[in-house]
Structure formats: C-alpha cells, structure tokens
Image (tube, helix red, strand yellow):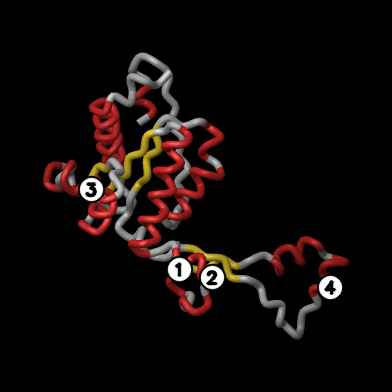
Amino acid sequence: LEDSLAKREGAFEVLNFAVPGYSTYQEVETVAARGLAYDPDIVVVSWCVNDFSIPFFLFTRNEYREKDVSYFYNLLFDRKQFASMAAPQVRKGSQIEKGYMDPGVLENTGEEGVRRSLIRLKELGEREGFKIVVAGPMYHEIVDILNEIEMPYINFYKAMPANEYPKEYHIHFMHPREGGHRVIAEHLEKYFDEQGWLDASP
C-alpha cells in the first residue's frame, strides 16, 4: 500500500501495528496506547473471521507453588534465572478454561465486546480526527454491527469475489499470500480515493 501511495503526489506513510492473535479489543487499545502518537489520518482495522473469539494468546500467572525451587535464592544469586522463572507464561487462549480467565478478557469478546471496542475506536477517531475503515472477509454478524454503529467497511467477500483471483492468493484467508496483499492494498487505495481521504493527506 505504501509503495503504491508513494506514486501519488504528496507524502504518505503506512504503519503496521498488527500483532498475531490480537482481538478487536486489543487492536483498539493498541491504537489508543501506541498509534495516536503518530497522529494518523486513517486507521484500518483488519477484520478476521475469528475476531469475536478470545485472544489467541494469553498470559498465565506464575503461582509460585513449586516445592523444589527457591525463588528467593535465585532472586539473590541468579537474577537471569529468576526473571525467566517469574515471567508470565504464554498459552493459547483455546487451551485455558474460561473459568480461569480474567473476566476483563471475556467481557471484551463476542459480539458485544466487538461492538463496544469499535464504538470506542469511533469515539477516538472523532476526538483525534482520523478516518476509520474495517476491512476483511465479513459474515452478517460483523456487517450488522458496523451498519448499526455507522462505521465504514470493505467486505472482501463482496468487493473481492474469490473466483476473480488465483486461489493461491488466499484473498479471504486470515493470512493472505503476497498476491492477496497486493490486491487488498489496491482495494484499500481505491476506497480511500473514492472517499476523498487521500486529497486531505499532507
């Protein structure tokens, strides 16, 4: 996308804040915590079919219950080992029973969690002055939410019918291949142009 925009008059920069396995809630919090520092003009949320689910990766706390380990000894004499032992462990969210999850994780999943997160993003955009578009392969559940909160979107299933592109592009898969990324970038640029968003960029 940046390579294509560079051919236009003006200065354009594309920053990628994507993190594997993030939920919509985490994506919006990334915009708030890190993205705003770059004063964005446009924020693109890449929608994935599993974004209603719990985050793919979660931290599990260390319970410090091992009886054959002295954390105090390692704290005093082997700080590197202590840091490794005390660090939270990363596990797949699907491997953790919901009863053991932080309630804050659960309340930000599902349709309600996604709706709440996107409304927060919309409020951030209105306050900070950036445009938003959600882009990806979308079923009716997310389309209904986006229509309800009046947030722009590009539904890849309609904008990019799979039979119009080589199968190896994986246009509708969560991890498109190089050709798929190129096609998605073309559609994003076309959409920005149609909305007049590129005219206002410095």
Residue that numbered label 3 is attached to = 168
Q: Position of residue 177 (x, y in %)?
A: 31, 45
Report the front residue among 42 and 187. Answer: 42
Location of the N terminus by quadrant is top left
Q: Residue beneath label 1, please?
A: 106
Whole-angstrom CA distance, mark 3 to mark 1, is: 35 Å
Q: Nearer the viewer, residue 119 or 35?
A: 119
In primary-sequence order, the first of circles 2 and 3 is 2
Amino acid type for the residue under numbered disc 2 = Asp
**Relative side of 139 to 178, left or right:** left
Q: Residues within 10 Å of mark 1 (few under 14, many from 20)?
A: some
Residue type at mark 3 is Glu
- Residue at 50% of width from left, 49% of height from top? 29
Residue 116 in percent (x, y) is at 40, 55
Give the alpha-carbon distance from disc 4 to disc 2, as whole Å: 28 Å
Q: Nearer the viewer, mark 2 or mark 3?
A: 2
- The quarter holding residue 189 reads top left
Where is mark 4, residue-wise? 72
Q: Which mark is residue 40?
A: none
